[in-house]
Amino acid sequence: MLDEAWSIGDVARLSGVTSRTLRHYDSIGLLTPVGTAPGGRRLYGRDELVRLQQILVLRELGVDLPSIGRVVRSGDDRRAQLAVLRQHHERLLAERDRYDRLAATVASTLQSLDGGRTMAAKDLYAGFDNSEYEVEARERWGTEAVDRGASAWERLGKSGQAEHQAEATAIGEGLAACLADGLGVDDPRVQSLVARHHAQVALFWVPNRESYTGLGQMYVDDPRFTATYDAFAPGLAPYLRDAMAVFAAAQLT
C-alpha cells in the first residue's frame, strides 16, 4: 500500500496536464504510474510528481518528447542530461538575443514617442526576421489567404492561441503514440486525431479533398514541416501525410 499517492485526476489538477496527456506519457514509457487503485485508476507517487515536473521543465525549454525520454530515463547519467540541456540552452540564448533586439526596438519607439521625435521608418522594424516566410507564404497560398489566416489567429487572442498550440502538441503526441503502436493510418484512433488536425486547419482556411491532401504532402516535401512532426517521432511526417490522404478521401469533397 502506498503511503502517499495521487490519482491521475489529482495529478492533472495539480500540474495542469490533461489526463489524456498523462495516459499518453504512460503509453510511451515517459511517466509510468507507480500503481493502480482498486477501480483501475492510475496512481502516482512523489517520485512520479518530481519526474513530471522535470518533463514539464524540459517541454518549456522546447525539448522534444524523444529527447525528454532520454533525459529522464538516464537517471544518474549526468553526461546525457547535460548534452541535451546544453543543446537547448544554446537555442534559448539565441532566442534571448532575438527578444533583446525586439525589446530594444520597442524601447526606441517608446522614447521616440515620448520625446515627440519621428523614428526612421526602417528602424521601426529592427529585430524582426519574418519577411522571408511572409513572402514565401504569399507566393504559395496568395495574399488573401495569408491575410485571412493572420486575422483569424489574432482573433483567437492570447488564451485561444495557447489552447490552439496545446491542441497541436496533443495531436502530434497522439499520432506519435499511434505510430509507436503500429496502427495503420486508417485506424479509427488515427483518423480521430486527423479529424482534430483538420479542425485546427479549418480555423484559418477550409481545405477540400485536394488541398488537404496537398497539405499533407507539403509536410513531407518541406524540410521545416518534416522536422516539426518528426520531432514527435521519426517518420511521423509521412505517417501523417498518408493519414490525411485517407481522411480527405473519406470525409472531404
Image: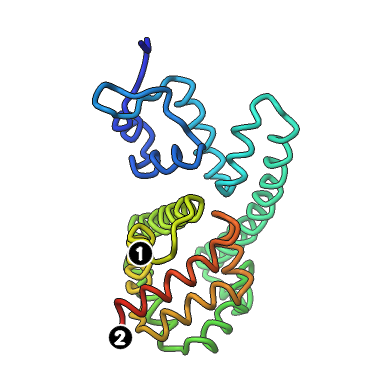
Q: Residue at x 37, y 14 (%)?
A: 4
Q: Name the N-terminal-most of marks 2 and 1.
A: 1
Quadrant of the rendered image containing residue 225 = bottom right
Task: Residue under label 1, please give it.
Answer: 191
**Marking on residue 59:** none
- 24 relative position to 102: left or right: left
Q: Which quadrant of the rendered structure holds the C terminus?
A: bottom left
Position of 79 relative to 6 (above/below): below
- The answer to which of 103 and 194 lies nearer the viewer is 194
* CA separation in Å, label 2 and label 1: 17 Å
The residue that label 2 is drawn on is: 253
Q: Position of residue 164 (x, y in %)?
A: 37, 60
In this rendered view, identify the residue nearer to me: 48 or 38.
38
Residue 193 sits above or below residue 92 on the image: below
Q: Residues within 10 Å of mark 2 (few under 14, many from 20)?
A: few
Cβ atoms under marks 2 and 1 closer than 8 Å: no
Please state which amino acid type lies under the numbered disc 2.
Answer: Thr
